[in-house]
Image (tube, rainbow, N blue to C red):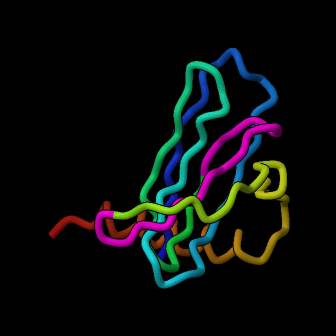
Amino acid sequence: MVAAMFSQLPPNFPDRILCYYINSTTQTQRACITSIPNWVFERIVFPHQRLLFEALPDALLEIHGLSGLHETLLTQIPCLQLQVHEGQPWQRELGRQSEALIRTDWIEE
């Protein structure tokens, strides 16, 4: 499953980076960034789901595990470590799947 979600930063942040996170667990997670002034990023990330997002190099992605009514902070990952670099193997997979989704959206029945 591939999910590409963008939450654009305000234009006054020119040093933004594209980041990629994979929930490789069997647990639903909440990913959030609250360390950027006047901007909050928050997404639910299902097991094995992939997430693309923009952030600043010094931002931290917090990953919270969700279990019933409980939520636990699992880790904080510097966004610089999640930065997309050209030529990574997963980019080819994401590109192919995104193209397939786009093509099927335009098929008229």
Residue at coordinates 69% horizontally, 15% vertically from top-left? 12
Percent across and percent down for residue 88 are 81, 70
Q: Main secondary structure of the magenta part?
A: strand
In terms of depth relative to the viewer, which is nearer, 55 or 33? 33
Q: Residue furthest left?
A: 109
In the displayed structure, would residue 50 be above or below residue 64?
A: below
Q: Horizontal placement of 4 versus 37: left or right?
A: left
Check the image and name the residue furthest to the bottom: 26
Write down the quadrant of residue 81 in the picture: bottom right
Residue appearing at x 74%, y 56% in the figure:
77
Q: Residue furthest top?
A: 12
**Percent coordinates x, y for residue 4 in the rendering:** 51, 58
Residue 40, percent from left and from top: 52, 33
Query: Foreground: 76 or 92?
Result: 76
Q: How many marks?
A: 0
In magenta, the rendered stretch is 53-69
Q: Residue at x 74, y 39 (%)?
A: 59
Name the image quarter holding residue 44.
bottom left
Q: Quadrant of the C terminus?
A: bottom left
Within the magenta stretch, is there residue 63? yes
Q: Is residue 3 left or right of residue 89?
A: left
38 w.r.t. 99: above or below: above
In the rendered image of this protein, does residue 23 appear above or below residue 86?
below
Q: Residue at x 82, y 39 (%)?
A: 57
